[in-house]
Image: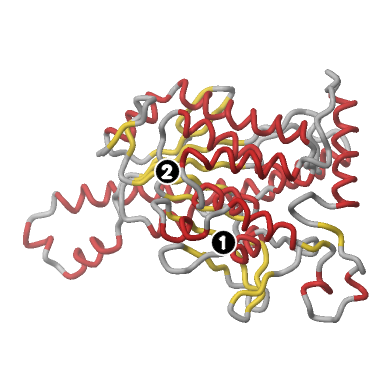
């Protein structure tokens, strides 16, 4: 049952989580979502992120609630400062060419406060060093994180943080979590160290790369680690649905959408379906006679099931027609502002039909919701 209510009259369960996946420049969409959630009075207990989601998550967990949005704004305005917002033309073809040009500038010159091209280039670096296996240097990101994040608050504050990365030598996925680890800039950078562009980050003698190589959403970690009824706002930066591509550029964009969204959708749908099944098993066990409940096999089943309520709200970035396959590394100010506004709009669309979510939380059900055609709808299954 819900234990609190936001100003938006949405009942909140014991645990409210924001799950942020990787997607580079699309992370501004996540910032817009967080800003809208805070304005609704929705307090977060836990934030988990992969790649750029880890950066946003660290800023959220490492700042007071009333300052986190400003710090996120500072980050996103900083990384988009090399490509200021120019007057936009209401023509998708022209905006697409501007969009492509901005991405080319990023590839050539890097992103302020994030990464810069290696000089000398990697082929001249000492072999088997981070400099030899990456095109860019992320030292600027370390300085940015240290400036924007209060690491003491992040590690010992009220909001739990989890970030995922993959070990280069073993391929094993690992979550760094403030309940078990002392997290600093290295852990955030490791979660976003996408090869071969960005260098691996060494932690405790091991190299780590971007967690998105294995899983682009931390939802599974969150659900498995939680022991309470929970509400998850899952921010997806790549849509599963899209039109048939017209050319090679659109084919590249669509392939990227399918590659990342398919894994995310399979995980989220499977977790909610499992909770529903466990709830049915729990109800069935409750109807057994007392002597049957004492059987070892029944006790074993009881230990296996998790019937706590799980509600997942998927907030999915729907790119405008002019955003192409380069949209995850196009850091212009105009595009950043557009993505931020899309994030706010996604929350507003979800809350229009917030009674559907409120009913599910109040009744202790497990459901998955997504915004479709501007409305919040329960997903099938």
- SS for callout 1: strand
Which label sits in the foreground, 2 or 1?
2
- Mark 1: give few (<14), some (14-19) or many (20+) Cα within 10 Å: many
Left or right? Give the position of 35 relative to 88: left
Q: Which residue is situated farthest in the front direction here?
A: 147
Numbered badge on residue 321: none
Residue drawn at (89%, 45%) of the image: 105
Q: Residue at position x 57%, y 22% from top? A: 374
Residue at 59% x, 23% y is 373
Distance, label 2 to label 1, CA atoms, is: 19 Å
- Position of residue 187 measured from the top left corner of the image (x, y, whole percent): 59, 65
* Residue 147 in the image, given as x and y percentages of width and height: 63, 54
Give x and y (percent) for residue 206: 63, 78
Residue 98 horizontal side relative to residue 233, left or right: right
Using the rendered view, name the quadrant where residue 354 is placed.
top left
Camera-nearest residue between 361 and 68: 68
SS for dot 2: loop
Q: Which residue is mark 2?
A: 44
Mark found first going from the N terminus, 2 or 1:
2
Residue 370 image offset from top left, x and y in percent = 51, 33
Local packing at callout 2 (Cα closer than 10 Å; few below 14, some 14-19, many 20+) is many
**Pointer 1 residue:** 164
The image quadrant where one finds the C terminus is: top left
Residue closest to the eye, 347 or 85: 85
Please state which of residues 260 and 108 is positioned toward the viewer in this rendering: 108
The structure residue drawn at horizontal position 46% and vertical position 61%, both measured from the top left corner, is: 155
Q: Is residue 54 above or below residue 196?
A: above
**Does residue 205 appear to the left or right of 335 in the view shown?**
left
């Amino acid at each position: 049952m819900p234990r609190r209510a936001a100003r938006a009259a949405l009942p909140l369960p014991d645990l409210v989580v924001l799950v942020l996946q990787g997607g580079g420049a699309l992370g501004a969409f996540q910032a817009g979502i967080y800003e809208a959630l805070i304005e609704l009075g929705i307090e977060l207990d836990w934030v988990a992120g992969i790649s750029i989601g880890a950066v946003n998550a660290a800023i959220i967990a490492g700042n007071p609630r009333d300052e986190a949005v400003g710090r996120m704004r500072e980050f996103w305005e900083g990384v988009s400062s090399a490509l200021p917002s120019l007057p936009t033309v209401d023509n998708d073809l022209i905006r697409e060419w501007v969009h492509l040009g901005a991405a080319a500038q990023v590839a050539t010159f890097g992103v302020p406060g994030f990464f810069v091209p290696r000089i000398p280039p990697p082929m001249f670096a000492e072999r088997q060093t981070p400099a030899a296996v990456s095109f860019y240097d992320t030292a600027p990101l370390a300085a940015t994180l240290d400036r924007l994040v209060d690491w003491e608050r992040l590690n010992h504050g009220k909001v739990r943080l989890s970030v995922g990365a993959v070990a280069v030598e073993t391929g094993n996925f690992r979550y760094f979590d403030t309940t078990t680890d002392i997290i600093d800039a290295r852990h955030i950078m490791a979660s976003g160290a996408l090869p071969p562009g960005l260098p691996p980050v060494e932690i405790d003698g091991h190299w780590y790369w971007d967690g998105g190589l294995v899983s682009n959403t931390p939802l599974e970690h969150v659900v498995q680690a939680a022991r309470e009824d929970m509400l998850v706002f899952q921010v997806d930066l790549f849509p599963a649905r899209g039109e048939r591509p017209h050319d090679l550029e659109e084919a590249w964009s669509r392939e990227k959408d399918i590659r990342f969204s398919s894994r995310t959708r399979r995980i989220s749908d499977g977790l909610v379906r499992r909770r529903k099944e466990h709830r049915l098993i729990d109800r069935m066990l409750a109807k057994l006679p007392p002597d049957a409940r004492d059987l070892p096999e029944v006790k074993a089943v009881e230990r296996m099931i998790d019937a706590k309520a799980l509600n997942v709200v998927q907030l999915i970035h729907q790119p405008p027609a002019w955003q192409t396959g380069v949209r995850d590394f196009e850091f212009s100010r105009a595009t950043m502002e557009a993505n931020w506004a899309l994030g706010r709009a996604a929350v507003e669309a979800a809350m229009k039909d917030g009674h559907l979510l409120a009913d599910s939380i109040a009744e202790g059900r497990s459901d998955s919701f997504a915004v479709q055609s501007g409305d919040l709808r329960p997903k099938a299954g």
